Image (cartoon, rainbow, N blue to C red):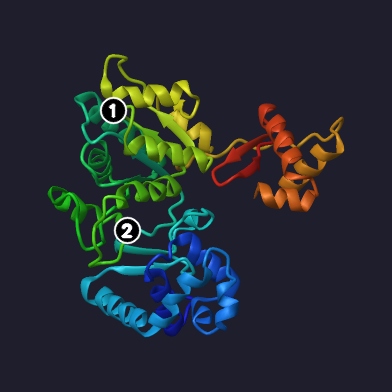
Amino acid sequence: MQNQTHEELRYFIALALAPKVGPGVFKAILAYSGSPTAFFQIPKGKAAKIPKVGPKLLEIRSAEQSLLRQADELLNSSQKSNFEILTSLDPSFPQRLKSLEDGPVLIFKKGNAELNLERTVGIVGTRNATTYGKASTQKIVVDLAQYQPAIISGLAYGIDIEAHRSAIQAGLPTIAVMGSPIDQIYPAVHRKTAELLQENGALISEYAPGSKMMPGNFPARNRIIAGLSDALIVVEAAEKGGALITAEIAYSYNKEVFAVPGNLQSTYSEGCNQLIKKMKASIYTGPNDISEALFWTKPGETKAKKTEVDLSGREEMEKAILLYLKEKGESEIDLISYSTEIPLGLLSSKLLSLEFEGIIKSLPGKKYKLLV
Protein backbone atom coordinates (compact mmCIF):
# COMPACT_ATOMS: atom_id res chain seq x y z
CA MET A 1 0.00 0.00 0.00
CA GLN A 2 2.81 2.41 0.83
CA ASN A 3 4.92 4.09 -1.86
CA GLN A 4 7.41 4.97 0.86
CA THR A 5 10.13 2.75 2.24
CA HIS A 6 9.84 1.85 5.92
CA GLU A 7 12.54 4.40 6.78
CA GLU A 8 10.79 7.16 4.84
CA LEU A 9 7.55 6.28 6.58
CA ARG A 10 9.24 6.51 10.00
CA TYR A 11 10.54 10.00 9.24
CA PHE A 12 7.21 11.12 7.77
CA ILE A 13 5.34 10.10 10.92
CA ALA A 14 8.05 11.53 13.17
CA LEU A 15 7.87 14.95 11.53
CA ALA A 16 4.07 14.93 11.44
CA LEU A 17 4.02 14.22 15.20
CA ALA A 18 6.55 16.93 16.05
CA PRO A 19 5.25 19.75 18.28
CA LYS A 20 4.05 22.85 16.42
CA VAL A 21 4.32 21.14 13.02
CA GLY A 22 0.80 21.53 11.66
CA PRO A 23 -0.26 20.67 8.09
CA GLY A 24 0.84 24.06 6.72
CA VAL A 25 4.33 23.86 8.21
CA PHE A 26 4.70 20.21 7.23
CA LYS A 27 3.78 20.93 3.60
CA ALA A 28 6.22 23.85 3.50
CA ILE A 29 8.99 21.59 4.79
CA LEU A 30 8.10 18.89 2.28
CA ALA A 31 8.00 21.36 -0.63
CA TYR A 32 11.35 22.89 0.30
CA SER A 33 13.28 19.83 1.51
CA GLY A 34 11.80 17.20 -0.76
CA SER A 35 11.16 14.75 2.09
CA PRO A 36 10.91 14.64 5.89
CA THR A 37 14.14 12.61 5.95
CA ALA A 38 15.99 15.35 4.06
CA PHE A 39 14.71 18.01 6.50
CA PHE A 40 16.66 16.38 9.31
CA GLN A 41 19.80 16.19 7.16
CA ILE A 42 20.09 19.56 5.39
CA PRO A 43 22.36 22.24 6.95
CA LYS A 44 20.81 24.29 9.74
CA GLY A 45 21.16 27.58 7.86
CA LYS A 46 19.30 26.22 4.86
CA ALA A 47 16.60 24.64 7.03
CA ALA A 48 16.04 27.96 8.84
CA LYS A 49 15.08 29.59 5.55
CA ILE A 50 12.15 27.26 4.94
CA PRO A 51 8.90 29.30 4.87
CA LYS A 52 6.84 28.98 8.08
CA VAL A 53 9.75 27.29 9.93
CA GLY A 54 12.32 29.76 11.24
CA PRO A 55 15.06 29.22 13.83
CA LYS A 56 12.80 28.42 16.81
CA LEU A 57 11.00 25.54 15.14
CA LEU A 58 14.35 24.05 14.15
CA GLU A 59 14.67 22.77 17.72
CA ILE A 60 12.62 19.75 16.62
CA ARG A 61 15.64 18.55 14.62
CA SER A 62 17.53 17.93 17.87
CA ALA A 63 14.67 15.65 18.94
CA GLU A 64 15.09 13.42 15.87
CA GLN A 65 15.72 10.17 17.74
CA SER A 66 12.92 10.77 20.24
CA LEU A 67 10.47 11.49 17.42
CA LEU A 68 11.58 8.37 15.55
CA ARG A 69 10.96 6.27 18.68
CA GLN A 70 7.43 7.66 18.84
CA ALA A 71 6.94 6.78 15.18
CA ASP A 72 8.18 3.23 15.77
CA GLU A 73 5.84 2.82 18.75
CA LEU A 74 2.94 4.02 16.62
CA LEU A 75 3.77 1.63 13.78
CA ASN A 76 3.98 -1.28 16.22
CA SER A 77 0.74 -0.22 17.89
CA SER A 78 -1.06 -0.07 14.53
CA GLN A 79 -0.37 -3.76 13.95
CA LYS A 80 -1.51 -4.78 17.43
CA SER A 81 -4.57 -2.52 17.62
CA ASN A 82 -5.78 -3.00 14.04
CA PHE A 83 -5.68 0.56 12.72
CA GLU A 84 -4.02 1.94 9.60
CA ILE A 85 -1.65 4.89 9.32
CA LEU A 86 -2.10 6.69 6.01
CA THR A 87 0.30 9.41 4.93
CA SER A 88 -0.52 11.91 2.20
CA LEU A 89 1.92 10.00 -0.03
CA ASP A 90 -0.06 6.78 0.34
CA PRO A 91 -2.37 5.85 -2.60
CA SER A 92 -5.09 5.03 -0.04
CA PHE A 93 -4.97 8.53 1.47
CA PRO A 94 -8.15 10.53 0.66
CA GLN A 95 -7.46 12.33 -2.62
CA ARG A 96 -10.15 14.89 -1.81
CA LEU A 97 -8.00 16.15 1.07
CA LYS A 98 -4.74 16.50 -0.87
CA SER A 99 -5.67 19.73 -2.63
CA LEU A 100 -6.66 21.48 0.62
CA GLU A 101 -4.08 23.92 1.92
CA ASP A 102 -5.01 23.06 5.52
CA GLY A 103 -5.71 19.38 4.86
CA PRO A 104 -4.12 16.78 7.16
CA VAL A 105 -0.96 14.97 6.13
CA LEU A 106 -1.51 11.96 8.39
CA ILE A 107 -4.74 10.00 8.88
CA PHE A 108 -5.48 7.13 11.25
CA LYS A 109 -8.16 4.73 10.05
CA LYS A 110 -10.18 1.80 11.36
CA GLY A 111 -12.68 0.00 9.15
CA ASN A 112 -13.15 -1.68 5.80
CA ALA A 113 -14.16 1.20 3.52
CA GLU A 114 -11.58 2.75 1.24
CA LEU A 115 -11.46 6.51 1.51
CA ASN A 116 -11.55 7.40 -2.19
CA LEU A 117 -15.15 6.44 -2.82
CA GLU A 118 -16.76 7.69 -6.02
CA ARG A 119 -19.57 9.67 -4.35
CA THR A 120 -19.76 11.29 -0.93
CA VAL A 121 -22.32 13.41 0.91
CA GLY A 122 -21.65 15.05 4.25
CA ILE A 123 -24.57 15.44 6.66
CA VAL A 124 -24.14 17.61 9.75
CA GLY A 125 -26.27 19.47 12.22
CA THR A 126 -26.95 20.36 15.81
CA ARG A 127 -26.22 18.04 18.71
CA ASN A 128 -29.68 18.95 20.05
CA ALA A 129 -31.61 17.47 17.14
CA THR A 130 -35.38 17.78 17.16
CA THR A 131 -37.80 15.12 16.00
CA TYR A 132 -38.07 17.04 12.72
CA GLY A 133 -34.29 17.06 12.32
CA LYS A 134 -33.91 13.34 12.96
CA ALA A 135 -36.77 12.47 10.60
CA SER A 136 -35.30 14.76 7.92
CA THR A 137 -31.90 13.09 8.27
CA GLN A 138 -33.39 9.62 7.92
CA LYS A 139 -35.34 10.65 4.81
CA ILE A 140 -32.33 12.33 3.21
CA VAL A 141 -30.23 9.17 3.57
CA VAL A 142 -33.02 6.86 2.35
CA ASP A 143 -33.68 9.11 -0.67
CA LEU A 144 -29.97 9.35 -1.54
CA ALA A 145 -29.46 5.58 -1.31
CA GLN A 146 -30.44 5.22 -4.99
CA TYR A 147 -27.18 7.03 -5.88
CA GLN A 148 -25.07 4.92 -3.49
CA PRO A 149 -22.96 7.67 -1.90
CA ALA A 150 -20.87 7.31 1.23
CA ILE A 151 -22.27 9.37 4.10
CA ILE A 152 -19.73 11.54 5.93
CA SER A 153 -20.32 12.91 9.43
CA GLY A 154 -18.68 13.43 12.81
CA LEU A 155 -20.05 10.77 15.21
CA ALA A 156 -21.40 13.53 17.49
CA TYR A 157 -24.74 13.61 19.27
CA GLY A 158 -27.84 14.65 17.32
CA ILE A 159 -27.81 14.88 13.53
CA ASP A 160 -24.34 13.31 13.10
CA ILE A 161 -25.12 10.01 14.79
CA GLU A 162 -28.53 9.90 13.10
CA ALA A 163 -26.78 10.21 9.72
CA HIS A 164 -24.41 7.33 10.53
CA ARG A 165 -27.20 5.08 11.83
CA SER A 166 -29.44 5.85 8.85
CA ALA A 167 -26.58 5.02 6.47
CA ILE A 168 -25.94 1.68 8.18
CA GLN A 169 -29.65 0.86 7.96
CA ALA A 170 -29.73 1.85 4.27
CA GLY A 171 -26.67 -0.28 3.49
CA LEU A 172 -24.51 2.71 2.60
CA PRO A 173 -20.87 3.11 3.64
CA THR A 174 -20.42 5.82 6.23
CA ILE A 175 -17.23 7.53 7.37
CA ALA A 176 -17.01 9.07 10.83
CA VAL A 177 -14.44 11.84 11.19
CA MET A 178 -13.45 11.86 14.83
CA GLY A 179 -12.27 14.76 16.96
CA SER A 180 -10.78 12.24 19.36
CA PRO A 181 -7.81 9.91 18.85
CA ILE A 182 -8.59 6.84 16.77
CA ASP A 183 -8.46 4.61 19.88
CA GLN A 184 -10.92 6.70 21.87
CA ILE A 185 -14.59 6.71 20.84
CA TYR A 186 -16.21 9.99 21.82
CA PRO A 187 -18.91 10.17 22.97
CA ALA A 188 -18.54 6.69 24.45
CA VAL A 189 -22.29 5.99 24.12
CA HIS A 190 -21.78 5.84 20.34
CA ARG A 191 -19.32 2.93 20.59
CA LYS A 192 -21.80 0.37 19.24
CA THR A 193 -22.53 2.51 16.17
CA ALA A 194 -18.79 3.13 15.73
CA GLU A 195 -18.19 -0.64 15.70
CA LEU A 196 -21.06 -1.37 13.33
CA LEU A 197 -20.10 1.27 10.77
CA GLN A 198 -16.59 -0.19 10.42
CA GLU A 199 -18.02 -3.24 8.63
CA ASN A 200 -18.94 -1.20 5.56
CA GLY A 201 -17.41 2.15 6.46
CA ALA A 202 -14.58 3.61 8.52
CA LEU A 203 -13.54 5.70 11.48
CA ILE A 204 -10.82 8.24 10.73
CA SER A 205 -8.91 10.73 12.85
CA GLU A 206 -5.88 12.95 12.43
CA TYR A 207 -5.06 12.42 16.11
CA ALA A 208 -2.65 9.66 17.08
CA PRO A 209 -3.67 6.95 19.55
CA GLY A 210 -2.79 7.94 23.09
CA SER A 211 -2.75 11.66 22.33
CA LYS A 212 -4.63 14.07 24.56
CA MET A 213 -8.13 14.99 23.45
CA MET A 214 -8.34 18.79 23.20
CA PRO A 215 -11.47 20.98 22.76
CA GLY A 216 -9.98 22.50 19.61
CA ASN A 217 -9.86 19.09 17.94
CA PHE A 218 -13.56 19.16 17.18
CA PRO A 219 -13.75 22.45 15.25
CA ALA A 220 -10.55 21.38 13.43
CA ARG A 221 -12.02 18.05 12.29
CA ASN A 222 -14.87 19.94 10.59
CA ARG A 223 -12.53 20.86 7.74
CA ILE A 224 -11.98 17.15 7.08
CA ILE A 225 -15.73 16.50 6.97
CA ALA A 226 -16.09 19.39 4.51
CA GLY A 227 -13.10 18.27 2.46
CA LEU A 228 -14.29 14.67 2.14
CA SER A 229 -17.80 15.67 1.07
CA ASP A 230 -18.69 16.31 -2.57
CA ALA A 231 -21.83 17.97 -1.20
CA LEU A 232 -22.64 18.98 2.37
CA ILE A 233 -26.17 19.06 3.80
CA VAL A 234 -26.87 20.99 7.00
CA VAL A 235 -30.05 19.58 8.53
CA GLU A 236 -30.47 21.65 11.68
CA ALA A 237 -28.18 24.28 13.14
CA ALA A 238 -28.49 27.04 15.70
CA GLU A 239 -27.18 30.52 14.92
CA LYS A 240 -23.73 29.42 16.10
CA GLY A 241 -22.19 25.97 16.24
CA GLY A 242 -20.02 23.31 14.65
CA ALA A 243 -22.42 22.59 11.79
CA LEU A 244 -22.23 26.20 10.63
CA ILE A 245 -18.43 26.11 10.86
CA THR A 246 -18.44 23.03 8.64
CA ALA A 247 -20.79 24.73 6.17
CA GLU A 248 -18.60 27.84 6.02
CA ILE A 249 -15.52 25.71 5.39
CA ALA A 250 -17.30 23.68 2.70
CA TYR A 251 -18.40 26.94 1.06
CA SER A 252 -14.79 28.20 1.12
CA TYR A 253 -13.71 24.93 -0.54
CA ASN A 254 -16.23 25.55 -3.35
CA LYS A 255 -18.27 22.51 -2.34
CA GLU A 256 -21.98 22.20 -3.00
CA VAL A 257 -23.65 23.26 0.26
CA PHE A 258 -27.32 22.64 1.03
CA ALA A 259 -29.45 23.50 4.03
CA VAL A 260 -32.78 22.05 5.10
CA PRO A 261 -35.15 24.98 5.70
CA GLY A 262 -36.98 24.96 9.01
CA ASN A 263 -39.59 26.60 11.17
CA LEU A 264 -38.87 30.29 11.67
CA GLN A 265 -39.74 29.88 15.34
CA SER A 266 -37.23 27.05 15.89
CA THR A 267 -33.84 27.90 17.39
CA TYR A 268 -32.31 24.96 15.55
CA SER A 269 -33.46 26.19 12.16
CA GLU A 270 -31.90 29.64 12.51
CA GLY A 271 -28.52 28.54 11.19
CA CYS A 272 -29.94 26.78 8.13
CA ASN A 273 -32.24 29.65 7.28
CA GLN A 274 -29.36 32.12 7.59
CA LEU A 275 -27.15 30.03 5.29
CA ILE A 276 -29.89 30.13 2.67
CA LYS A 277 -30.50 33.85 3.20
CA LYS A 278 -26.79 34.67 2.80
CA MET A 279 -26.66 32.47 -0.33
CA LYS A 280 -23.99 30.24 1.21
CA ALA A 281 -26.27 27.23 0.84
CA SER A 282 -28.98 26.13 -1.56
CA ILE A 283 -32.33 24.95 -0.24
CA TYR A 284 -32.42 21.18 0.06
CA THR A 285 -35.74 19.83 -1.19
CA GLY A 286 -34.81 16.30 -2.24
CA PRO A 287 -32.18 14.00 -3.77
CA ASN A 288 -32.54 15.60 -7.21
CA ASP A 289 -30.88 18.72 -5.79
CA ILE A 290 -27.73 16.69 -5.16
CA SER A 291 -27.83 14.66 -8.38
CA GLU A 292 -28.28 17.78 -10.52
CA ALA A 293 -25.52 19.69 -8.74
CA LEU A 294 -23.04 16.82 -9.00
CA PHE A 295 -24.27 15.31 -12.30
CA TRP A 296 -25.01 11.97 -10.71
CA THR A 297 -26.95 9.25 -12.45
CA LYS A 298 -28.57 6.21 -10.88
CA PRO A 299 -26.89 2.81 -11.38
CA GLY A 300 -27.73 1.56 -14.88
CA GLU A 301 -28.82 5.00 -16.04
CA THR A 302 -26.86 6.47 -18.96
CA LYS A 303 -25.91 10.10 -19.21
CA ALA A 304 -27.33 12.14 -22.03
CA LYS A 305 -24.93 12.43 -24.95
CA LYS A 306 -23.14 15.75 -25.01
CA THR A 307 -23.50 18.02 -27.99
CA GLU A 308 -20.43 19.48 -29.65
CA VAL A 309 -19.31 22.81 -28.21
CA ASP A 310 -20.05 25.63 -30.64
CA LEU A 311 -17.11 28.03 -30.86
CA SER A 312 -18.55 30.23 -33.61
CA GLY A 313 -18.89 33.81 -32.55
CA ARG A 314 -16.81 33.26 -29.43
CA GLU A 315 -14.00 35.64 -28.50
CA GLU A 316 -10.48 34.20 -28.44
CA MET A 317 -10.23 33.84 -24.66
CA GLU A 318 -13.50 31.93 -24.43
CA LYS A 319 -12.42 29.70 -27.32
CA ALA A 320 -9.14 28.94 -25.54
CA ILE A 321 -10.96 28.06 -22.30
CA LEU A 322 -13.55 25.85 -24.00
CA LEU A 323 -11.00 24.04 -26.18
CA TYR A 324 -8.84 23.34 -23.15
CA LEU A 325 -11.79 21.99 -21.14
CA LYS A 326 -12.93 19.95 -24.14
CA GLU A 327 -9.53 18.26 -24.17
CA LYS A 328 -9.21 17.78 -20.41
CA GLY A 329 -12.86 17.26 -19.42
CA GLU A 330 -12.31 19.13 -16.16
CA SER A 331 -9.42 21.11 -14.71
CA GLU A 332 -8.36 23.31 -11.81
CA ILE A 333 -8.49 27.06 -12.39
CA ASP A 334 -4.71 27.44 -11.93
CA LEU A 335 -4.02 24.93 -14.69
CA ILE A 336 -6.56 26.59 -17.00
CA SER A 337 -4.84 29.92 -16.40
CA TYR A 338 -1.39 28.46 -17.03
CA SER A 339 -2.41 26.59 -20.19
CA THR A 340 -4.45 29.40 -21.76
CA GLU A 341 -2.13 32.21 -20.52
CA ILE A 342 -5.17 34.11 -19.23
CA PRO A 343 -4.54 35.99 -15.93
CA LEU A 344 -6.48 34.54 -12.99
CA GLY A 345 -8.55 37.68 -12.35
CA LEU A 346 -9.73 37.88 -15.95
CA LEU A 347 -10.13 34.10 -16.18
CA SER A 348 -12.46 34.05 -13.15
CA SER A 349 -14.73 36.56 -14.87
CA LYS A 350 -14.77 34.56 -18.13
CA LEU A 351 -15.49 31.31 -16.29
CA LEU A 352 -18.36 32.92 -14.40
CA SER A 353 -19.91 34.16 -17.67
CA LEU A 354 -19.60 30.71 -19.24
CA GLU A 355 -21.14 29.15 -16.14
CA PHE A 356 -24.11 31.53 -16.32
CA GLU A 357 -24.60 30.37 -19.91
CA GLY A 358 -24.74 26.78 -18.71
CA ILE A 359 -21.71 25.75 -20.78
CA ILE A 360 -19.39 24.93 -17.90
CA LYS A 361 -19.89 23.99 -14.25
CA SER A 362 -17.76 24.81 -11.21
CA LEU A 363 -16.77 21.76 -9.17
CA PRO A 364 -15.33 21.30 -5.66
CA GLY A 365 -11.65 22.19 -5.38
CA LYS A 366 -11.81 25.21 -7.73
CA LYS A 367 -12.26 22.96 -10.74
CA TYR A 368 -14.35 23.54 -13.84
CA LYS A 369 -16.03 21.07 -16.15
CA LEU A 370 -17.37 21.39 -19.68
CA LEU A 371 -21.08 20.53 -19.90
CA VAL A 372 -21.61 20.48 -23.67
Vertical placement of 7 versus 91: above or below?
Answer: below
| Residue 39: x %, y % from top left | 52, 78
Q: Report which residue position mark 2 lands on.
A: 205
Q: Closest to the observer: 84 or 183?
A: 183
Quarter of the figure with the N terminus = bottom left
Q: CA distance from mark 1 to mark 2?
A: 27 Å
Q: Closest to the observer: 325 or 350?
A: 350
The residue lying furthest to the left in this view is: 189
Q: Residue at x 46, y 29 (%)?
A: 281
Q: Report which residue position mark 1 lands on.
A: 136
Q: Would you say 360 lies left or right of 130 here?
A: right
Q: Closest to the observer: 282 or 37?
A: 37
Q: Amino acid at mark 2?
A: Ser
Which mark is first along the chain, 2 or 1? 1
Asked which quadrant contains residue 243, the reply is: top left
Query: In the rendered structure, are the residues bearing label 1 and label 2 in contact, judged by CB atoms less than 8 Å apart?
Result: no
